[in-house]
Image: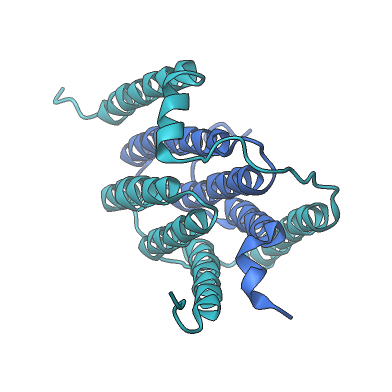
Amino acid sequence: MNLSHLPDQAAIYFLLAAFLLAVGVFGLIRRRTFIGMLISGELIFAAAGLNFMTVNRFMAPDPAVGQVVVLFIMGLAAAEVAITLSIIIAVYRNYRSIHSKELSELKG
Amino acid sequence: MRPFPLSAYLIVAIFGFIIATTVTGALIAILSRRIIRSVAGLALCSLGLAGLYYFLNSPFLALMEILIYVGAVCVTIIFGVMLSETDEPEPQDKLGRERWWAVVAALVSVAIFWGLAHTSLYGAWPVTGAPATDGSVQTIGVSLLTTYSLPFELISLVLMVAILGALTLARGGRDKS
């Protein structure tokens, strides 16, 4: 088996992106603090970017499009992190906790 | 000119190392109980992703990944950790429920991974010919300022609104009164 074509296989990148998405969803369900959930969300963003770049490299006719799209995804992820962290800090100031179990005032 | 000896194997080894970095970083990011280690795992995963972007013919995005994720996002999350709590809570007496949720989460993520892996391995992916452009930084710059100029400007608007919103949100409750 010739290993030297390994970096040119689209399937490896697709599998890695699927792994990152699955890990991110697992963390999003499993984590009990907001910062942990935010980190899992970042992994999901990374999976989306990797998937876009794979399609861009192996299947798109114009290789510039995917790079532009991934750049936009990175910008949106940065904006999301800024907003989420300020919400987390505001929540911590009001509740003295960032555990998702303890913010249950709206629970009936 | 003779190529560097064993250069093909060297490239494969570097590729495997990058994949291992990405996977290890992602696993550290979700499994570690201390949040600061999760942030370090996210940084490691971003470094691996930068390497993958390099292998996908885009050194520009590799640079941007390191600059934005390792340089900005992780540092911002570390600031958030310093301003709030640092650890996941210890699993309490409801151990059965915790384990049940872990099983549910694992089932969901395995289902997602299996479905996507099946699609990517056996899907009918189109094969295209030679690319129309070279995808260099110059091409990206030109297309950002011609074809994609509206989204480009909108991203800057989104970032400005996000900064203002973050300032407003984090300021509440800090007044002297």
Say which residue appears at 65% left-offset and 69% top-offset: A6
Q: Is residue B153 visible?
A: yes
- Residue B16 picture quarter: bottom right
> For this rendering, which residue is in front, A80 or B150?
B150
- Measured along the vertical axis of the image, is residue B24 above or below residue A81? below
x, y percent for residue B116:
76, 53
- Measured along the vertical axis of the image, is residue A6 above or below residue B13? above
The residue most toward the front is B1
Say which residue appears at 38% left-offset and 18% top-offset: B157
> For this rendering, which residue is in front, B28 or B174?
B28
Say which residue appears at 57% left-offset and 38% top-offset: A66
For the colour cyan, the matching chain is B
> For this rendering, which residue is in front, A74 or B141?
B141
- Measured along the vertical axis of the image, is residue B25 above or below residue A26? below
For the colour blue, the matching chain is A
x, y percent for residue B106:
71, 62
- Residue B144 picture quarter: top left
Q: Is residue B75 left or right of residue B21?
A: left
- Residue A16 picture quarter: bottom right
x, y percent for residue B61:
44, 46
Q: Quadrant of the N terminus of chain B?
A: bottom left
Q: Is residue B95 visible?
A: no
